Amino acid sequence: MLTKETLPACPVETTLALITSRWKVLVLRDLLGRGTMRFGELQRSVGKVSQKMLTQSLRQMEADGLVCRTVYAEVPPRVEYSLTPLGESMRPVLDAMLAWGESYQARVRAEA
């Protein structure tokens, strides 16, 4: 979690500090595209992430205010994850990453 004391001076570095993990970016991608998801759904959609790494990433994202974790008092307990308004504000960043990635992929395929 970033604080006043640990906040980087550079805005780009601040953004990277929040989404630097591969798993965090993929969680953002899936929650932006699909909305609220349960842990198992996220784990399947993200790919080859371990339960430990996904849990750690989600906890960090929750602490940073990007993700909201909702626990329902049911048996068995149901936990859902969704983006906060701050997390939703990452949409243009991920859209730019998508556009750049598509362009790069097309360039590599054209060179092959």
Image (cartoon, rainbow, N blue to C red):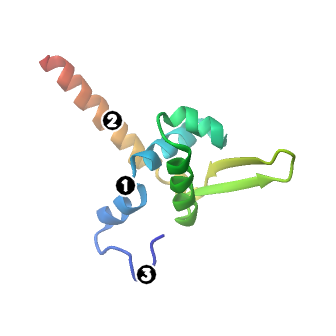
Indicate the position of residue 40 as horizontal and vertical percent values.
Answer: 64, 38
Q: CA distance from mark 2 to mark 1?
A: 19 Å
Quadrant of the rendered structure where residue 62 is? bottom right
Q: Nearer the viewer, residue 78 or 27?
A: 78
Q: CA distance from mark 3 to mark 2?
A: 33 Å
Disc 2: which residue: 99
Mark closer to the observer (2, 1): 1
Quadrant of the rendered structure where residue 100 is? top left
Kind of residue indicated by mark 3: Lys
Q: Secondary structure at mark 3?
A: loop
Q: Residue at x 73, y 54 (%)?
A: 70
Q: From the viewer's perspective, is residue 100 above or below residue 1?
A: above
Mark closer to the observer (3, 2): 3
Disc 3: which residue: 4
- The answer to whether 46 appears left or right of 80 in the picture is left
Seen as rendered, the residue at the extreme left is 111
Q: Considering only order in the chain, which callout, 2 or 3, is on the residue closer to the N terminus? A: 3
Q: Considering only order in the chain, which callout, 1 or 3, is on the residue closer to the N terminus? A: 3
Q: CA distance from mark 3 to mark 1?
A: 19 Å
Disc 1: which residue: 20
Q: From the viewer's perspective, is residue 88 above or below residue 41?
A: below
Indicate the position of residue 86 as horizontal and vertical percent values.
Answer: 54, 59
Q: Residue at x 50, y 54 (%)?
A: 89
- The answer to whether 43 appears left or right of 80 in the picture is left
Q: Residues within 10 Å of mark 3 (few under 14, many from 20)?
A: few
- The answer to whether 29 appears left or right of 110 in the picture is right
Q: Residue at x 12, y 19 (%)?
A: 111
- How many marks the image carries: the answer is 3
